[in-house]
Amino acid sequence: MSEELFPEPEWLSEEVKTGTTIIAVTFDGGVVLGSDSRVSAGESVVNRVMNKLSPLHDKIYCALSGSAADAQTIAEIVNYQLDVHSYLSPMSYDPLVCSAATLVKNISYKYKEELSAHLIVAGWDRKKGGQVYATLNGLLSRQPFAIGGSGSFYINGFVDAEYRKNMTKRESQEFVVNALTLAMGRDGSSGGVAYVVTIDKDGAEEKCVLGNELPKFFDE
Amino acid sequence: IVSTFNNYNDLYPDWTQREVSTGTTIMAVEFEGGVVIGADSRTTTGAYIANRVTDKLTPIHERIFCCRSGSAADTQAIADAVTYQLGFHSIELDEAPLVQTAASLFREMCYRYREELMAGIIVAGWDPRRGGQVYTVPVGGMMTRQPVSVGGSGSSYIYGYVDSNYRAGMSKEECLKFTAEALTLAMERDGSSGGVVRLAVISEQGVERQVILGNQLPKFSTV
C-alpha cells in the first residue's frame, strides 16, 4: 500500500460503468422498457439521474448497460445507421426492430474484444408488433422479455415466476417497475429513479418514476 | 459465459483439478411455531456433478438443523464439530439447547478460521424459549437472525422473488410452498444448483422431512 497524505480517489482512475438494471417486456400491442438511473465509477456515483433508455428511432429504443462510453457510442452509431437506412431505402414505413437489433449486434460482435456493453433493443413495427431482442456479447436473440445489467441477477427468479404471456399494457408497466425496484433494492450499482418507456403503434411514451413513488416491498 | 481452463487443458478432466463444492441454493423461513428449511441436492466438482442427490440439511441436534453451502469438506467438518460441542453442552445443561447457541458455535468457528474456510451456513430450528428461529452465518463469520434467509450461489437469482413474495405471519403450508417455489426458480437459473428439492419442517412436534422430485417441481412460464 502506498502511503500518501491525500491518496487519489479511486473513481478518478476507474472506468465509468453503468452498474445498472435494465429490462424490456413485450405485451399485446407493444413493448415496455425500463432502467434505473445510476452511473458509478468505482464506489462513487457520478450520475444519479442518467436515462439509460436511448432512442434509436421513433418507435425503437435501446436500453444501455455495461461500460457507459461503449454503450452510448453503439447507440449513437446505430441511430445514425438507422437514419441513413430509412432515407436511402424506398420505404414508406418505419424500420423494423429486427433491423435495429441486427445493426447493434453487428457492432457488438465485430468489436466484442474491445467493447463491454450489453444493449437490449425493443420497439414496435408494423410487421411483427412489439419485439424485444437481447444482444449480449454479439448474440442476437428475440425473447418475450429480457433483463440485463448487474442488478438483473437478483431478479431472475422474480421475472421467471411473475412473467405471463399477453399481459396488458398496464400490467407490463407494473411488472417492469416492480422488477426494477426489487433489483435496485439489492444491487449496490443500481439505484436512483426508474425510467419507463412504453412503445406501441401510436408512438413512444417516456415516464420517470421517482424514488418515493416506487412500490415498497418487505425488507428484512 | 465461457469459463477459463487451467494449464492442463485437455490432458486431464476438469473435475480432477477442482475442489468439491456444494454450489447450492439453501433457504430457511420462520413461521409461527417453527421453521421451514430447504435446499437443492447438487454437489459439483468443477463441471462434474459428484452427487445429484446430496442432503444439505444436516441435523445438529434434535430440533436444530443447518443448511450448508460452499466447500463440501469445510461445511461437513464444521457441522461435525458443532454437533459434538452442542451435544456436550446440552448434556451439561440437561435441557434442549437454544438455536442461538448452535448459531454462535458456528459463528465462532467460521470467524476464527475465516481465512482457511469457505462456508456459508444457515442455522435453523425450534427451541422452547424462543420458538422457531433462523440465523445466517455467511462467509466471513458474521451471524444475524432473519425471518427469512437464502444462501449459496443460486441465492442471488431469487432475492427479488423472496423480497416480493415474503409476508410475515405465513402458515406452515404457505412457507413450504414459498420455499419450494423459490428453490425451483434458483435451480432453473444456477448451473451449480439442481436435482431435487429437500424440505424439512422443524417444530415442537419434531422434524418432518420431504423430497420433491424433478418432475413434481412447480412449473413457471419461462417460455
Image (spheres, coloured by chain):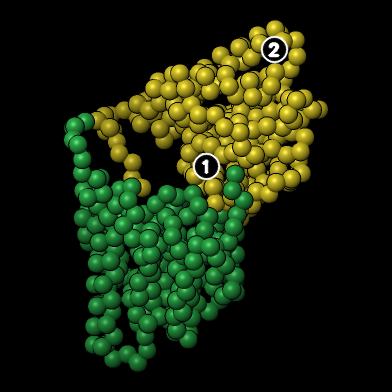
Chain colours: A green, B yellow
The percent coordinates of residue A74 (x first, y second) are 26, 67
| Residue at 40% in and 80% down | A59
Residue at the right extreme, as displayed:
B205
Q: Which residue is mark 2?
A: B90
User: Residue B155 — which label?
Assistant: 1
- Along the viewing direction, whichever of B172 and B110 lies nearer the viewer: B110
Left/right placement of residue A78 relative to residue A152 reads left
User: At which x and y percent is residue A20?
Assistant: 39, 57
Q: Nearer the viewer, residue B58 or B172?
A: B172
Mark 1 on the same chain as mark 2: yes
Residue at horizontal 28%, vertical 66%?
A72
Across and down, in percent, residue B46 comes to 40, 32
Give, as a three-letter code, the residue at label 2.
Answer: Ser
The Cα atoms of the two marked residues, 1 and 2, are separated by: 33 Å
Q: Dot 1 falls on which chain?
A: B
Q: Quadrant of the C terminus of chain B?
A: bottom right
Query: Does residue A149 appear left or right of residue B148 in this picture?
Result: left
Identity of the residue drawn at 35% across and 26% down: B17
Which of the 4 quarters of the picture holds residue A83? bottom left
Q: Is residue A123 visible?
A: yes
Q: Residues within 10 Å of mark 2 (few under 14, many from 20)?
A: some
Give the quarter of the image for residue A60: bottom left
SS class, disc 1: helix
Disc 2 element: helix
Towards the viewer: B129 or A26? B129
Q: Write down the chain letter for disc 2.
A: B
